[in-house]
Amino acid sequence: MSENNNDIIKQADDMAKELVKFSERINFNEEMFLDIIQESIAPAEEFFSYYACAIMEVETKFKVLNEMFSLKYDGNPIENITSRVKDYDSIIRKVIKKNIPRDLESIEENIHDIAGVRVVCSFVDDIYRLARCLLQQDDVTLISKKDYIKNPKPSGYRSLHLIISVPIFLENQKKNVKVEVQLRTIAMDFWASLEHKLKYKKNLPEEKKDMLSQELIDCANESAMLDERMQNVRNIILKGE
Ligand code: 0O2
């Protein structure tokens, strides 16, 4: 351990000892301590719970659309839906990267993917159909749209990204909450999870990383062609020609 770390640990230890002395002096009991902790984490808990509620709303919308589409078309358009509320560490990393104020109001204003819903479909047409149906619902507001299917990223990444705002109804108020929706095919999802592994792989020589990135660009192009061919087969089946 470095000397610097030892200094920090010593300082923290000294501060803890001072706090204990202080709490003894003012007769600060365990109950009071827990109250203070509870009071300081309550706003953050409430903040995260809004996003968890918004995820439930958006997931339900997709589940309803899936059910309705399965009656009208051939089978369910959605293969799976996964959701997450961004963890605290990732939010802080983004706050630093974007250089925004470190308060909940600014985080809510500037970070749009705290709530994330990922919808995986078999066919590209279903992605656009689902997006259109979601966006025409009168309680859904589109904030921004990035079509990485029509305009893939240089890495080869493909997906349709929507930042939407949906209302959640609380005890005495309505709150609009932002949710990032990523829609992609099974092939795009398979590719993205493999590429994600490469992105976060440490201890891999740079030249190997470059070679694998190029390989992944080729894989992304091939799998996009496969998506297109499968879509064509399905279109012919549906037309009954
Ligand atoms: P996580 O853990 O997946 O959520 P932003 O940084 O979001 O303000 P940006 O650059 O406009 O701004 O976001 P972008 O690129 O439209 O979308 C970000 C998310 O898309 C990423 O989330 C990934 O989930 C996904 N994504 C974008 N590009 C790639 C890529 O090249 N490869 C893979 N595998 N996924 C990608 P986060 O925040 O990185 O993390």
Image (cartoon, rainbow, N blue to C red):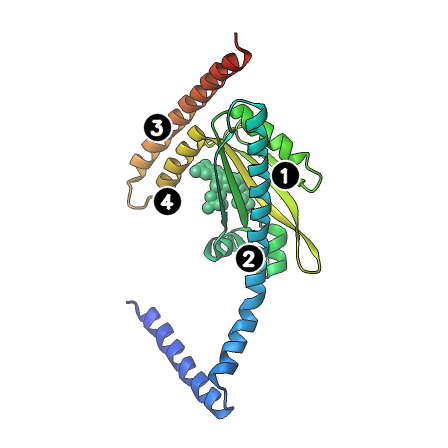
Of the two numbered discs 3 and 2 in the rendering, the one whose residue sits closer to the viewer: 2
Q: Which residue is mark 4?
A: 200
- Left or right: 202 as drawn, with respect to 20: left
- Residue receiving disc 2: 48
Alpha carbons under labels 2 and 4: distance apart: 26 Å
Of mark 1 and mark 3, the one earlier in the sequence is 1
| SS of the residue under disc 4 | loop
Question: Which numbered disc flags the more N-terminal residue, 1 or 4?
Answer: 1
Q: Amino acid at mark 2?
A: Phe
**Camera-side residue: 7 or 179?**
179
Question: Looking at this view, is 61 or 224 the one in front?
Answer: 61
Quarter of the image that includes the N terminus: bottom left
Q: Quadrant of residue 125?
A: top right
Instruction: Give the amino acid at mark 1.
Output: Ser
Element under disc 2: helix
> How many neighbours does mark 4 have within 10 angstroms: few (below 14), some (14-19), or many (20 or more)?
few
Q: Is residue 82 above or below residue 74?
A: below
Q: Is residue 78 left or right of residue 14?
A: right
Nearer the observer, 229 or 234: 234
Residue type at tag 3: Glu
Q: Is residue 131 above or below residue 170?
A: above
Residue at the extreme top: 241
Which element carries disc 3, helix, strand or loop? Answer: helix
Q: Which residue is mark 1?
A: 144
In primary-sequence order, the first of circles 3 and 2 is 2
Q: Amino acid at mark 4?
A: Tyr
